[in-house]
Amino acid sequence: MKTFEIHGSTGDSFIHVGETLRNLEKYLPSGKVVLITDTNVKTYYENQFPSYPLITLETGEAIKTLDTIHQIYEALLKFEADRSVFIVGIGGGIVCDITGLAASTYLRGVRFGFVSTTLLSQVDASVGGKNGVNFQGYKNLIGVFNQPEFVICDIELLNTLPEKEILNGMAEIVKHAVIEDADLFAYLEKHSQKALALDIDIIEKLVYDSIVIKSGIVNQDELEKGARRKLNFGHTFGHAFEKTAGVPHGEAVSAGMAAAVAISVKRGRLSNENAARIKTLLQRIGLPVAIRAERKKVFDALKKDKKREGDHIYFVLLDGIGKAVVDQIPLTELEALFVN
Ligand SMILES: NC(=O)c1ccc[n+]([C@@H]2O[C@H](COP(=O)([O-])OP(=O)(O)OC[C@H]3O[C@@H](n4cnc5c(N)ncnc54)[C@H](O)[C@@H]3O)[C@@H](O)[C@H]2O)c1
Ligand SMILES: [Zn+2]
């Protein structure tokens, strides 16, 4: 097990990579504790939960709403949770995002931690202190920045995750390597197949390195003005593909990274050789480098991107593997990609 410490403006967070859910109790204060999970995680792992009152949510993006937060407040009242309560979210990004918002607002904020049960939530959602829910079709419109006191990343729990969910996490791991860490990229080239087979040591290194990279970037820029934009690599096109083609986040981001790679080559920043390495790695992992989608719809979605300013968009390009740069590029240049 390796522990990574984050000292953010909203508090300190300890991320324990390779710790197990069975040891959760060790991290909890004596006193009232409430657990929040979803039906899938409950089915597989309730036998490993310490015995505290449990709130069980349904699954899927559709439950990331203020209604669910409302239900959690009601349950907390029913459990007579006061300011001393400690709340633990046990699940993927959805359970953790919801738990963080509920805990940060109940009684103006009570203590909370996470057990992260998906690869995506371990490598992405466990760092950065973002919590929130969707509102009227807008993703994560309502939320707060607030760090969980701890995050347990239990690698063994990933064995029951559907393959699609593993790929969602792998796409973000590749992203972290490509934008910031050439050594990690080379490591992935060497070990991608063992990673897909969920080799514990390899996944533990990938999760830990991802956390170090993401938190390094977040620390430079906690409130998302400059450096943090790098974490959007592949996500401008990715979100547009996700919306228009309805593909999973990881597939959309993978094809989005391939598009950003192509633009980086076109602009003379990235060599053809490095572009080919990135695409080959994505394909070896089983991620797509293109998505079938209606071009006009994709471009319309791009125009609505929140990173747009006037007729330009903040776009993350590569100067090399491990070297991301943020540039403002004209929408017309992106449009041109769709007409040849
Ligand atoms: N806060 C952040 O910084 C941040 C970062 C990235 C993503 N997110 C958010 O995270 C959400 C996506 O998270 P996710 O990909 O973890 O999805 P998720 O929470 O929906 O989990 C994916 C599926 O796997 C199931 N599951 C979870 N753990 C399991 C396990 N160990 N075994 C078997 N099944 C399991 C879940 O029930 C669900 O059906 C999105 O809402 C996104 O906005 C937040
Ligand atoms: Zn993402």
Image (cartoon, rainbow, N blue to C red):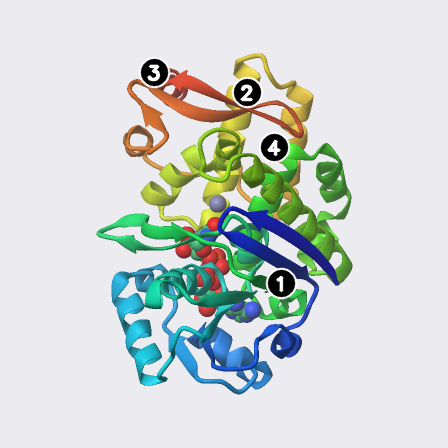
Q: Secondary structure at mark 3?
A: helix
Residue annotated with mark 2? 264
- List the single residue furthest toward the front: 83
Residue lying at 51% horizontally and 46% vertically, measured from the top left: 9
Residue annotated with mark 1? 153
Of the image marks 2 and 4, the number of the one nearer the N terminus: 4
Amino acid of disc 3: Thr
Of the image marks 1 and 3, the number of the one nearer the N terminus: 1
Residue annotated with mark 3? 332
Give the spatial CA distance, label 2 vs label 4: 12 Å
Label placed on residue 221: none
Across and down, in percent, residue 324 comes to: 59, 27
Label placed on residue 179: 4
Left or right of 239, for residue 200:
right
Q: Secondary structure at mark 4?
A: helix
Residues at circles 3 and 2 in contact by the CB criterion of under 8 Å: no
